[in-house]
Amino acid sequence: MRIRTRISILFTLITATILLVFACTVYFSAVENREREFYALLKKEAYTKANLFLNAKVDKKTLEDIYHNNRKILNEVEVAIYDTRFDLLYHDAVDIDFVKETPAMLQDILKNKEIRFYQEKWQVIGITFPYKDKTYIITAAAYNQYGYNKLNSLLSTIFLVFKKYDFI
């Protein structure tokens, strides 16, 4: 093999490696960003629902109707509100109830002020909410269909770029 051919192959491999590392960095950064942003959205939704229920005194039936109507169109956030005795004060959809809150989970939320976890592909956040000298425990859960679609689109784009230039 001639030296010019070796240098060309080596340059191609180095370039492909650099592009692959860059593409992986962009993708995994997007994965982390999607997760972080969605937890922030869940937190906002939880606070909003708590304010509607506790502060604005919107009745349970109205909030449940809003949830059920939105659920037909959107991947709506499922919210539950508890007092510090772990009594359920409000739940968007007890009949669906994707997240089964246990006393241990609620105690963990009280202790740590906030917990985050996945249940299957649903992201779940548990937070405390101080209101009028009382503390409430809120859980919020949803499936981030939009975020996962964006990640799949990004992955497809990365794959197509590598395929187009015959790196794969």
Image: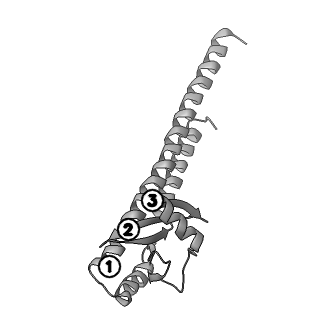
Which is more N-terminal, label 3 or label 2? 3
Q: Is residue 105 visible?
A: yes
Front: mark 2 or 3? 2
Give, as a three-letter code, the residue at label 3: Tyr
Question: Which numbered dot is residue 129?
Answer: 2
Q: Kindly identify which residue carries mark 3.
A: 39
Q: Secondary structure at mark 3?
A: helix
Q: Residue at x 51, y 85 (%)?
A: 94
Q: Nearer the viewer, residue 123 or 58?
A: 58
Q: Secondary structure at mark 2?
A: strand
Q: Quadrant of residue 81?
A: bottom left
Residue 125 sits above or below residue 99 on the image: above
State if disc 2 and disc 1 touch (CB < 8 Å): yes
Q: Residue at x 48, y 47 (%)?
A: 30
> Whole-Å distance between the Cαs marked 1 and 2?
10 Å
**Label 3 crowd bin: few (<14), some (14–19), many (20+), radius 10 Å:** many
In this rendering, would 112 be left or right of 59? Answer: right
